[in-house]
Amino acid sequence: MWQVRPSLELPDWLIPEIRRHAPQVSGYHLAQLLLERGISTPEKLAGFLQTECYQPASPLEFGAEMERAIARLISARDRLEKVAIWGDFDADGITATSVLWDGLGEFFGESLSYTIPNRFTDSHGLHAKGIEALAEGGCTLIVTCDTGSTNLAELELANRLGIDVIVTDHHSLPDTRPPVAAIINPRNLPADHPLYYLSGVAVAYKLVEALYFELPEVPRRPLSALLDLVAIGLIADLVELRGDCRYLAQLGIQHLQKQLKTPTRPGVAKLLKFCKGSGDRPTDISFGIGPRINAVSRIHGDASFCVELLTSRDEKRCHQLALETELANTRRKELQRDVLWDVQKKLQKLDLSTTHAIVLSDPQWPVGVLGLVAGQIAQEYGRPTILLSTEGAAETGLGRGSARSVHNIDLYELVRSQAPLLHRFGGHPYAAGLSLPVENIPLFAEGIDRLLGERMGGLLSLEPVMTADFVCTVSELGYDLFQELKLLEPCGIGNPVPKFLIKNCWFGDIKNKNQTDLRGRKVRYIKTTFKLFDESCESGFPGVWWGHYEYELPRGRCDVIAELDFNAHQKQYEARLVAVRSAVGATETTPEPIQIDEIMDLRNNENRDILDLENGKKPLILKKCPTSWDEMRIWFRRAFNQGKKLAIAYSNPPNPSPVEVWETLVGIAKYLSRTHQPVTRQKLLAKLKIGDVSLKRGFDCLKCLGFQVEYQTDGEAKRQFLIRADKGAIADASHPELSALLDLFFSTIREEQFRQQYFCNVSLNTICAIAHQTILLGEEENPLGNQFPS
């Protein structure tokens, strides 16, 4: 089932506030998306968009547990104890280990070591063999990261062997506090705490941060040097990117994008080059660095060298390790595709009408890719999915695998309900790993399915719901929309990547091919590229569908749900296809438009007394001439939601020449710098008779003349967007960039004036037709897009 989110009524302050922080965007789509994410005040908006406006939580908010951890670390340092980091083999665990290796290494030097379990032989968490080996080597303190909260037996063993344990983790907690020196886990905090959603790497970072605060004179490297690693782990893991998670990811990406120009981590720079990323996008992590790190343990089991890859300063060694990582990733893609095909064949033999949870096993499945395939199946079939491999069960008697959730079902609690049947398990509400005796698999599957059926009241999700955030046309795709949606990044759980619906479109220039690895060998993992067309454009828009063949795209008219991305390697914007179906009009009856109340056309009319009559019910009045159909759509929806008529009562504004606008702006800037008087954005726009985009480009020109423009944000001015040119500027028309910036400023003014003229003269019939389509179920596209006659 497909659906489009209904449009929300926008508060008057929202779009001006968005434009205050990002003057280059229109803000209409972004405003809807922000409201859906709970951004309901200017203060929340500022903290969401700009890191400098967000107040992060102190690591001391972990309370007594953090105090115990810091005290124990200082004691170990003072007594020259041997300290071991115990990490995990996924991207979150590897980056968490790397953060502790670099961070604690500033305090412990050569007395520090690390251990990464083997995915194939050890699975997640602490294990007795490793603890015993550390005890024999003289270790007296273990600091875990991304693991350890529920390893009660192993923690007891460490105590008996004289090893203290500090647990840093974010997975679910046991019913009672484990026997440890300290446990720093955000699950101990209230669910609305800004630290609650931290991943393993972020918790490890908070421990190092607290130690930096306690012993500030010791470290030689700044704490901020760890932030790129924090961003990689946060975005690669399944945690909600809100609160401090979003803040740390934003900061980390700022540091990550510096690696290609001035690499301080040559291994990270090499990974970015292999995934053809620039480091400024979270997708460089989620589709690039993260999968490559995860692939090592999925293919080889042992991922210990990934810590060296991320922390070594030896460029030659890092190149070798990055190459091994890249080859593992290409092999992972191939295995994942093979297992996915096999799982789908097994599902064809099941009666899904009576199945609440999917639980499947096979002796041929490589355990390393089961989590990835389980995630794909869960999304496609709308059910929690658990895939188990019984490879090697003849020796161990165990099946091992992974589980992935869907529709906010708490998977960890679901699996824990079957604890008597399990050998071991761990995870969080969205993902879990487990092992169990092979003979228990049928009972486990039956118990999971029955319990989920009871919790759902017998309801089945027979068809996953595909939700688009908004409807658009092909002509609207590209730079402007991308820049607007990019302000939501980094995206993840709780802040998903925006999806758009394009209706009645078609594909052209379709190609698919197998990818090749670094040795030129073909990999059985494919992608299909295409050009997307609809009635709004003549030249198609580039697109890609990962993991699909050319024949899977329908011929003829269709509807698509996609995400907008930027291909840094090919330097082009592209639609990343999420779902496709034959056009609704081919098989369904299109509903009749919901009629908006009468639109009153009072453009260029000085006599507006009629606006105060209308049986005492004043219409909604649009007084400012719009410059895009997006602006008009907002007013159409507002009038419909309020049950009012819409009076378009703007006039064709006087159009001063661009040169006159520039001379006026320079005069105003000189006056403001001399008098130190502020001016509101509204007054400045009204005086210059231009729009926000032109004003921003005018500011760019002023800076070439030596002026400084700053935004006053004290008190009530947060809502008013005040502008100040405080310092006296010395005009210097010889600045080398001024001529080009003025040309851009002048062309922007002319474009705005052309659009205003268009909206003052476009026929009322056209306006009414687009209003009807805007209101039609809140999802019909504008046939003109944002295009204007040439």
Image (tube, grey):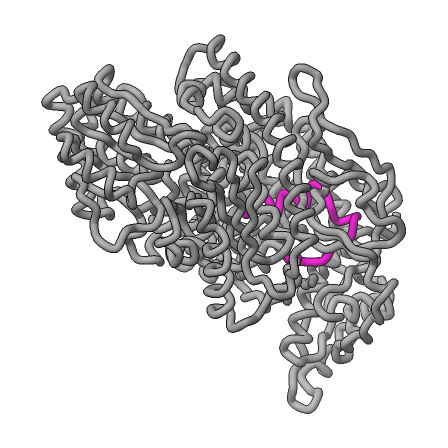
Residue 620: horizontal and vertical position, in percent?
Answer: 66, 75
Which of the 4 image quadrants contains residue 565?
Answer: top right
Which of the 4 image quadrants contains residue 467?
Answer: bottom right
Looking at the rendered image, the quarter that the N terminus falls into is bottom right
Residue 463: horizontal and vertical position, in percent?
Answer: 66, 62
- Of residues 72 and 115, the one nearer the viewer is 115
Q: Residue sitting at 52 percent across and 49 percent down?
A: 386
Residue 698 located within the stretch drawn in magenta: no
Residue 282: horizontal and vertical position, in percent?
Answer: 54, 37
- Of residues 534 and 455, the one nearer the viewer is 455
- Of residues 351 and 499, the one nearer the viewer is 351
- Of residues 279 and 178, the one nearer the viewer is 178
Which of the 4 image quadrants contains residue 364?
Answer: top right
Q: Residue sitting at 57 percent across and 32 percent down?
A: 284
Residue interval drawn in magenta? 467-488
Q: State the count of labels.
A: 0
Q: Residue sitting at 66 percent across and 21 percent down?
A: 517
Residue 385: horizontal and vertical position, in percent?
Answer: 54, 52
Residue 673 visible in the picture = no
Question: Along the horizontal axis of the image, is 567 left or right of 751?
Answer: left
Q: Residue sitting at 16 percent across and 41 percent down?
A: 67
Residue 472 located within the stretch drawn in magenta: yes
Question: Along the horizontal axis of the image, is 277 left or right of 661?
Answer: left
Residue 134 visible in the picture = yes
The residue lying furthest to the top in this view is: 316
Question: Along the horizontal axis of the image, is 218 left or right of 147?
Answer: left
Q: Is residue 618 above or below residue 262?
A: below
Question: Along the horizontal axis of the image, is 705 left or right of 181?
Answer: right
Q: Is residue 637 above or below residue 420?
A: below
